[in-house]
Amino acid sequence: MSHREPRPSRATGRGDGVPPARAVDASMGLLNDVMYRPVRLGPSRPSSGGGGSDKDGGRRRMVTAVLSGLLGLLTVTAILSLRAPAAAVDEGRALLVEEITDRTAERDDLETTSRQLSDEIAELQERLLRVSDPTLVAELRRLELLAGAVPVGGPGLVVELDDGAVLEQGAADPESRVQDVDLKMVVNALWAAGAEAMAVNGERLTSLTTVRTAGETIWVNFVPLTAPYRVEAVGDPATMQTRFARSSAAATLVSLESTYGITATVSTAEELDLPAGSARGLRYATTTVDVTSSTETPAQEGAS
């Protein structure tokens, strides 16, 4: 005899009135339906037999296509309207450009007139002083040369700096632009190398010269300059070239070229003509005669 108990039969009914036994997985019916039966997105519609369903689907597709086309047309129109400058903006820009051009021409004319008058004054001073005191004339010439008040010429060295390459989008990398610190570095190195006079893009450098950046533009003597920047230094070319090549500025220029693409060329010139610098009046403090000391008390001031 087997040790297992015989299983009860799964007959639909028993003659003794006892209900049939439930299946073991009878309570898993809902879970089985969810896991093993496909889920329908909606009740199926019986075909009406006249092709109405196909017509409705084609109509919906047509409406969707028309709406998509209209939406795309509106989007393109909006983009073009935003990109295209308005007439008022174009007119204002043209007026501003014209105003800048007129003011620049007026400034150039005033600078030319100022230089002509300065030359006439210098000539009259020299005529007057040559007769009365020739030694004073020589001293005046020396001081004018040191102050950059007179044009100079002679052999020298030329260092030219230019911005790096342009990006694929058409805009230049800010780090690839020549900055005011780069220009100051070259100028200081040339002074240390023995330069007697110097100019950057035609702007004479003096003891009152400022080299600074405003926005993305380098200003020298309050005049905006654009790349390339040509630094001309009058002096002994061989001496300056040797000393400049040994300076830290030369090594920095090589690093700028390899890192940011800034190009730097150094060449000698047999003759350089540097203009005179713009004259500026100096203001300085002077002591007055009748000034009481701030250390005196009011009683002492009254007694005095």
Image (cartoon, helix red, strand yellow):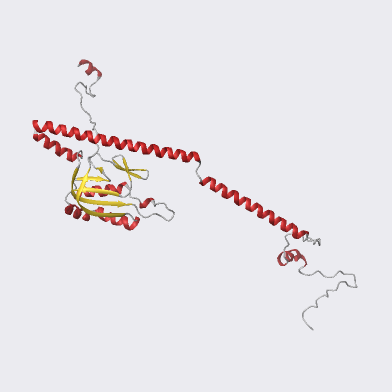
> Relative to 303, is 79 on the left or the right?
right
From this view, report whether residue 128 is shown above or below residue 142.
Answer: above
Q: Where's residue 288, x and y in %?
A: 20, 24
From this view, report whether residue 4 is shown above or below residue 42.
Answer: below
Residue positioned 24% across, 36% down in the render: 115
From this view, report whether residue 105 is shown above or below residue 62.
Answer: above
Residue positioned 22% across, 18% down in the render: 301
Q: Where's residue 274, x and y in %?
A: 22, 44
- For residue 273, what is the image quadrant? top left
> Relative to 173, is 115 on the left or the right?
left
The residue nearer to you, when weighing 251 against 7, is 251
Which of the image's four quarters has the N terminus?
bottom right
Residue positioned 23% across, 51% down in the render: 158
Q: Where's residue 54, x and y in %?
A: 75, 60
Which of the image's four quarters has the C terminus?
top left
Residue 186 visible in this rendered orientation of the protein: yes
